Image: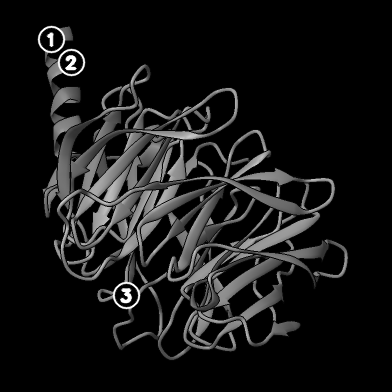
């Protein structure tokens, strides 16, 4: 009788697992880490579970972006600091930020509303309080600030900074006193004073990098004392000391993230650092490669670990909070690859690849429970 009951339970578990498009659908009740992948041509968001012991990904659901019909170049994502909301920006009509509530138990998404953007925005982020949304417009040469209400809905734009040549990214510093913004077209990494009460930005300083670097994305070191900037046009990583008190940058190193022998137009894309600050990675879309670097514990400078071939046109990747797994998406392969990060060396070992939607362009990772 006990054996029969056990078998019935096993059968129920097996029936609950359905293989669709290369993913295993499972009950999200056991999820600990959730991955969100935006697909710009499918106009949807994939919700996946990342298993902490194996790095395996399982699909929970695919959520459409309502009212969006045309395909966009990219679909940027951002997570609220309290991990209650996922913000999704569309670069085609309607140019807006769609807010999804994140279910704290399952990681599933519930669409709750949208707010307007003034232009096509390839990058969005929030301030440290989650009350303000920053957006950078590459085609519109703008940086903007939108309030976010208590329900997580983005409100009309309250500030527009014009003449920000090919603006490509913006992030607040650890203290939420300054916001940095990369403008690709004039080779600047800009610093703005930020008033968290009003949400207003005020120009403070700017640092010029080598001509035709094309500043694209950047990250802060977890210690808050360093900034790493990736140049799209030359695939160079620039290392800066960050003076958080005075809002000043001082460049100390530049190192190539371009696979040797690469020919054609360079297109570096994304950059991330492990949560412990030991390793940094960057992608380049022409060579379809990931560059890995070891971070010097004393001064934050970089030394090359390796180049790893990856998905075709890797515009986006992300690292989980444990620093064990790296996920990268290919815009043209329409696939997602997972890698394990060696804790001692930073070298990557590919685990598996999965079918994504069409033109995956952004990855965000959230740990559950979120509240």
- SS for tag 3? loop
Residue 225 x %, y %: 68, 38
Q: Quadrant of residue 46?
A: bottom left
Residue 43 x %, y %: 32, 75
Is residue 106 among the parts visible in the rendering? no
Q: At x 24% / y 34%, what residue is drawn? A: 56
Q: Distance between the Cα atoms at labels 2 and 3?
A: 42 Å
Q: How many marks?
A: 3
Q: Quadrant of residue 174?
A: top right
For residue 277, above or below residue 25: above
Location of the C terminus by quadrant is top right
Residue occupied by mark 1? 3
Residue 180 x %, y %: 66, 61
Is residue 182 among the parts visible in the rendering? yes
Q: Which mark is nearer the camera, 1 or 3?
A: 3
User: Residue 6, which numbered label?
Assistant: 2
Residue occupied by mark 3? 43
Residue 86 x %, y %: 52, 60
Q: Is residue 115 left or right of residue 332?
A: right
For residue 223, above or below residue 95: above
Pointer 2: residues within 10 angstroms few (<14), some, or many (20+)? few
Q: Nearer the viewer, residue 294 or 43?
A: 294
């Amino acid at each position: 009788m006990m054996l029969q009951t056990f078998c019935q339970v096993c059968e129920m578990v097996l029936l609950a697992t359905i293989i669709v498009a290369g993913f295993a659908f499972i009950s999200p009740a056991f999820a600990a880490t959730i991955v969100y992948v935006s697909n710009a041509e499918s106009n949807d968001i994939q919700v996946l579970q990342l298993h902490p012991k194996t790095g395996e990904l399982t699909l929970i659901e695919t959520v459409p972006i309502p009212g969006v019909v045309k395909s966009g170049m990219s679909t940027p994502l951002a997570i609220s600091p309290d991990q209650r909301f996922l913000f999704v920006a569309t670069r085609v009509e309607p140019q807006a930020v769609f807010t999804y509530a994140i279910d704290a138990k399952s990681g599933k998404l519930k669409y709750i509303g949208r707010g307007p953007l003034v232009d096509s925005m390839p990058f969005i982020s929030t301030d440290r309080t989650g009350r303000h949304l920053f957006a950078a417009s590459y085609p519109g040469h703008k940086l903007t600030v939108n309030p976010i209400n208590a329900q997580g809905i983005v409100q009309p734009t309250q500030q527009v900074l014009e003449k920000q040549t090919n603006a490509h990214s913006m992030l607040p510093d650890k203290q939420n006193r300054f916001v940095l913004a990369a403008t690709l077209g004039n080779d600047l990494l800009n610093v703005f004073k930020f008033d968290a009460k009003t949400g207003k930005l005020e120009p403070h300083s700017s640092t010029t990098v080598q001509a035709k670097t094309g500043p694209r994305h950047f990250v802060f070191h977890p210690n808050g004392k360093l900034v790493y900037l990736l140049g799209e046009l030359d695939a160079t990583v620039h290392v800066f000391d960050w003076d958080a008190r005075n809002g000043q940058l001082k460049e100390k190193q530049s190192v190539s993230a371009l696979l040797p022998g690469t020919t054609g137009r360079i297109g570096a894309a994304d950059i991330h650092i492990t949560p412990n600050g030991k390793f940094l990675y960057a992608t380049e879309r022409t060579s379809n490669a990931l560059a890995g670097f070891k971070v010097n514990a004393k001064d934050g400078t970089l030394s090359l670990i390796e180049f790893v071939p990856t998905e075709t046109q890797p515009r986006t990747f992300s690292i989980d909070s444990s620093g064990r797994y790296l996920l990268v998406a290919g815009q043209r392969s329409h696939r997602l690859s997972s890698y394990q990060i060696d804790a001692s060396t930073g070298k990557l070992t590919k685990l598996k690849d999965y079918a994504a939607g069409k033109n995956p362009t952004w990855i965000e990772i959230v740990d559950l429970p979120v509240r």
